[in-house]
Amino acid sequence: MTKTSSHTPIHVIGGGLAGSEAAWQIAERGIPVILHEMRGVRGTDAHKTDGLAELVCSNSFRSDDATSNAVGVLHAEMRLAGSLIMRSADANQVPAGGALAVDRDGFSDAVTAAIEDHPLITVTREEVTGLPPEDWDQAIIATGPLTAPSLAEAIQARTGADSLAFFDAIAPIVHTGSIDMDICWYQSRYDKVGPGGTGKDYINCPMDEAQYNAFIDALIAGDTTGFKEWEGTPYFDGCLPIEVMAERGRETLRHGPMKPMGLTNAHNPTVKPYAVVQLRQDNALGTLYNMVGFQTKLKYGAQAEIFRLIPGLENAEFARLGGLHRNTYINSPTLLDRSLTLKGRPGLRFAGQITGCEGYVESASIGLLAGRFAAAERQGATPILPPETTAFGALLNHITGGHIVSDDEPGKRSFQPMNINFGLFPPLEPGTVTKPDGVKRFRGKDKALAKKHATAARALEDCARWLKD
Ligand SMILES: Cc1cc2nc3c(=O)[nH]c(=O)nc-3n(C[C@H](O)[C@H](O)[C@H](O)COP(=O)(O)OP(=O)(O)OC[C@H]3O[C@@H](n4cnc5c(N)ncnc54)[C@H](O)[C@@H]3O)c2cc1C
């Protein structure tokens, strides 16, 4: 058995948003780190420089509002936790209204300098081509959506063919509270109970013939993303974008994901719907539902407009819209334990977008957690997980356990990457949000905003308490 001490380095593979943050958190706890980054030796399709934490596309970290926006809450928690990524972003901010946008070169330079100057971090420019050797007893894989092929193959060989995705074909996800249940109803097709079901597991949106035809016309006319990279994409069977299905024939969707069979409109039982859109519970809390079979590469604006044509979804709020991206990520809910360790391989963690979170800040925050967890273990302690009421905890919970696995579509991956959003937080205790004195009507937007304020305040309070532990 290899003997380790807190002087034995922890290896971090990938010097992106997650890997840089993980390395920093470990080193700040007095533990040496070897950070392996391949750029400088081998590039990716999206990165343009050799700098650490390069932003490959937008220069925005999105909203910085920690009172009513979930990503703003995550920013605030990261600042509380001493994040290098946030410190470097704050120091390189450019004007962007309520968003935190950065000078991308200044930001990457600041991260690179901090990492390279840290006495406990060694950066090696090399491609890691296989799983970390056993004598790297503590390691973090943070190689991102564009993980180099040989490492991706090694991960796939270790975890199984179905456990690694190479692109996302994502269906939109809707906040349950924004669905009009005076129009929709709960029912599983043919009232099938299935394993763990109730016979009422889906929310159904009915369409008559005219509504269906108008919807198909809108889909076909809809603006799709112009990504050249998707030309000739070999779509997985059963995973075709809906607009591609609609183009194949007016009736295709009615015989596919929108088939009305086995469903009776609870509000109008004598009239058979011509087509039905089904939504399936997406998180254990029941606050999010995904649109079954609605993966799409329509542009975001077109999606929101077209999907709000669906009866019951007129006021739908989307936790995420559909999309198609090149993205390497593992099936974390089945592969990782709660502290991001690969089951059956103690000491090997995953972090960043490869775990199935999405976005710069989310990836960095999972790097922050993986770094702290690995450091705790190196010091002989058990990692203390952040409470689920925090943005850290909500995201970690989505990745490692809060997601519902679909039993009725065997073989289909149901875990999809997601940005942080309030739908991932546990609901507030009843009575937390009450009508302010002197206010006559307290509902709609005002109530929703008050709930966001309360959820954000709870998160920051619980995060501060967790960090003191
Ligand atoms: C084309 C594209 C556009 C995007 N646009 C946005 C956007 O606008 N906004 C947003 O929030 N998110 C965007 N994303 C997602 C974004 O990439 C992630 O949110 C973020 O960069 C993920 O951080 P990460 O640390 O997990 O991965 P990365 O930042 O990609 O870092 C991974 C690092 O690992 C290195 N690496 C890979 N394989 C190996 C190996 N075998 N050995 C050693 N090193 C290796 C890579 O060179 C890279 O530096 C985009 C992604 C892509 C692919």
Image: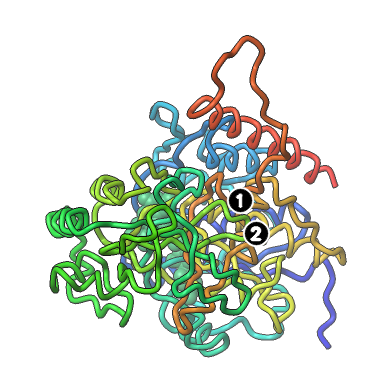
Picture coordinates of residue 143, whole percent (x, y): 50, 68
Identify which residue, 267 or 170, lies in the foreground.
267
Q: Residue furthest front?
A: 270
Which residue has dot 1 on it? 117
Quadrant of the image where one finds ligand 1: bottom left
In the depicted structure, whether residue 209 falls above or below residue 134: above
Position of the N terminus by quadrant: bottom right
Amino acid under disc 1:
Asp
Residue shown at 49% from the left, 52% from the top: 419
Q: What residue is drawn where x is 43% and y is 41%?
A: 106
Q: Quadrant of residue 268?
A: bottom left
**Residue 121: x %, y % from top left:** 65, 59
Residue 190 is left or right of residue 349, and the answer is left
Disc sitting over residue 397 in the figure: 2
**Looking at the image, residue 72 lies above or below residue 176:** above
Label 1 neighbour load within 10 Å: few <14, some 14-19, many 20+: few
Where residue 43 appears, as percent x and y from the top left, is 36, 68
Determine whether the residue tagged by mark 1 lies in a helix, strand or loop: helix
Check mark 2 vs ligand 1: CB closer than 8 Å? yes or no.
Answer: no
The amino acid beneath tag 2 is Asn
Q: Residue at x 52, y 54 (%)?
A: 288
